[in-house]
Amino acid sequence: MNLTKENVRKFLGWCSVINIGLLIYWILALTLGNELVFQIHTWWFDIPHDRFDEIHYTMMGYFKLAVILFNVTPYLALRFVKFATPTSIGNE
């Protein structure tokens, strides 16, 4: 596989889809099964429920920000910018 701009764009697009899917899964797990997820975590860590919710809310925000900065933004930049290679350099 050659490292072309088109391949990088496709790679970033699929990374965005996968990471957004993971974020949606995380949100659904905490929304629909909050008590189960909390019980699983309290087997390992002694943490109050409000702190548990705060940690997950904060980490989801960081994860979403990272996905937007490192996957979605470069994908959109490659998607919307035309990559016209100059054919007549110096022949003007």
Image (tube, rainbow, N blue to C red):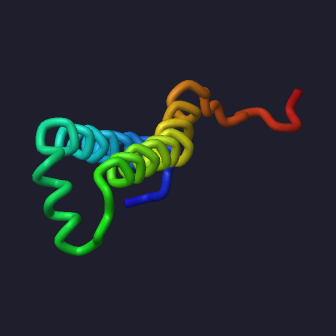
Which residue is situated farthest in the bottom direction here?
44
Task: From the viewer's side, name the closer residue of 80 and 48.
Answer: 48
Left or right of 38: which side holds 56? Answer: right
- Residue name at image x 82 percent, y 37 percent: 89
Question: In the picture, which quadrant includes the N terminus?
Answer: bottom left
The quadrant in which residue 47 appears is bottom left
The quadrant in which residue 77 appears is top right
Left or right of 62: which side holds 24? Answer: left
Residue 2 lies, with reference to residue 78, above or below; the image says below
Image coords of residue 91 (percent x, y): 86, 32
State how many labels appear.
0
The quadrant in which residue 38 appears is bottom left
Residue 37 lies, with reference to residue 17, above or below; the image says below
Image coords of residue 5 (percent x, y): 52, 45
Task: From the viewer's side, name the closer residue of 89 and 46.
Answer: 46
Left or right of 23: which side holds 77? Answer: right
